[in-house]
Amino acid sequence: EADIYQTPRYLVIGTGKKITLECSQTMGHDKMYWYQQDPGMELHLIHYSYGVNSTEKGDLSSESTVSRIRTEHFPLTLESARPSHTSQYLCASSEPGVGEQYFGPGTRLTVT
Amino acid sequence: GIQVEQSPPDLILQEGANSTLRCNFSDSVNNLQWFHQNPWGQLINLFYIPSGTKQNGRLSATTVATERYSLLYISSSQTTDSGVYFCAASYNFNKFYFGSGTKLNVKP
């Protein structure tokens, strides 16, 4: 079944640690996105990709980085986690042309 | 980017009541979606509706692109409808802009 997956679903980590949030999709979509969302608030785009070897920064400045080596995989990395990075991170992909977005289940990150 | 405004910010309904959620956007769009965020944080696609009207069960949506707004109708609300409803708009199929959401609480 075509879907979009995120791991881990929940992560509690100490300050200064390096973390990678995984996102994979089996829908064959070229475009993928990372959003950051604080509880009860709107979603902010932090990174997006048009396809392999393409990455762009979104409207919300983020200390995270992304890579797109394979169509189906779009990981997000924080080199040194800080408490200000505590948030929910949502990955999405969209159909070509039409552009309808589909979201993964999200990763809730807590940095202590 | 596109400014997206949703109203009302909060809504409390008695089970069985009907409601209308509104999404205004500041510029022409060619993609407009409605999502429901459940208590576990997952965003569920409700409608892809850049223009026109669609219906899915008790939910329906209408977008009037020339007047820059979209409406989401919920009829005969159920407690499982509770959560946050977001609309998102895009004008180039690349970047999507989200509203701040309508938090719906349906009481039994």
Image (spheres, rainbow, N blue to C red):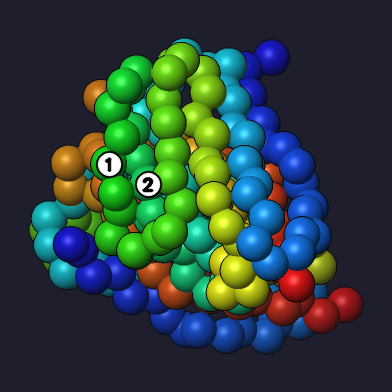
Coordinates of residue B26 in the picture (x, y in percent): 17, 69
Look at the numbered discs 1 and 2 and tell me whether their residues touch, using CB distance below 8 Å. Answer: yes
Coordinates of residue B9 in the picture (x, y in percent): 50, 84
Instruction: Give amino acid for label 1.
Output: Glu
Secondary structure, mark 1, is: strand
Q: Which residue position is annotated with label 1?
A: A56
At a point 57% along the width and 74% down the height, the residue shown is A84
At a point 68% along the width and 55% down the height, the residue shown is A17
Q: Which residue position is annotated with label 2?
A: A47
Residue A75, image quadrant: top right
- Mark 1 is surrounded, within 10 Å at the Cα level, by few (under 14), some (14 to 19) or many (20 or more) other residues, namely some
- The quarter of the picture where the N terminus of chain B appears is bottom left
Chain designation of label 1: A
Instruction: Establish if B29 lies above or below A67.
Output: below
At a point 30% along the width and 69% down the height, the residue shown is B4
Q: Nearer the viewer, residue A30 or B23?
A: A30
Left or right, B4 with respect to A39, comes to left
Any part of residue B66 in sight: yes
Left or right, A27 with respect to B6, comes to right
Residue A15, image quadrant: bottom right
Any part of residue B73 in sight: no
